[in-house]
Amino acid sequence: MTRDIIRIELTRDEALVIFEWLWRVDQAGTELHFEDRAEQLALWALQGRIEKQLGEIPGPDSGEQLSIARQRVRDEYSG
């Protein structure tokens, strides 16, 4: 079986913001509604791939780095 691969480009800031959100949802035990287990597995795969690309992930105490990343993402998409 061959798998079709797609590439998605994110800025480091976007990746950090998405990774932190996924981590926070996982840690909080927040229940997301998945229609199919494949959706959850795909999110876990995304989280793992982002983590691998980011290298050293800042811990929950490194709020300044995350705050800066969030601000840059907001600025980029605010116009």
Image: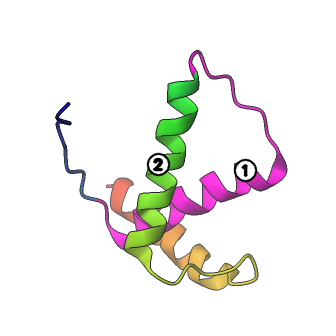
Front in this rendered view, residue 30 or 36 = 36
Main secondary structure type of the part rendered in magenta: helix
Q: Position of residue 44 (x, y in %)?
A: 54, 47
Residue at the image position 54 percent from the left and 60 percent from the top: 19
What range of the chain is rendered magenta? 10-36
Q: Is residue 14 left or right of residue 66?
A: left
- Residue marked by disc 1: 26
Q: Position of residue 59 (x, y in %)?
A: 69, 80
Residue 62 position, x and y percent, is: 68, 84
Q: Amino acid at mark 2?
A: Ala
Cβ–Cβ below 8 Å for labels 1 and 2? no
Q: Residue at x 62, y 22 (%)?
A: 34
Instruction: Name the residue located 51 percent from the left edge and 42 percent from the top edge.
Output: 43
**Residue 14 located left or right of residue 17:** left
Quickly name the residue at label 2.
Answer: 45
Label 2: state its secondary structure.
Answer: helix
Nearer to the camera, 74 or 44? 44
Disc 1 crowd, CA 10 A, few/some/many (<14, 14-19, 20+): few
Q: Is residue 2 magenta?
A: no
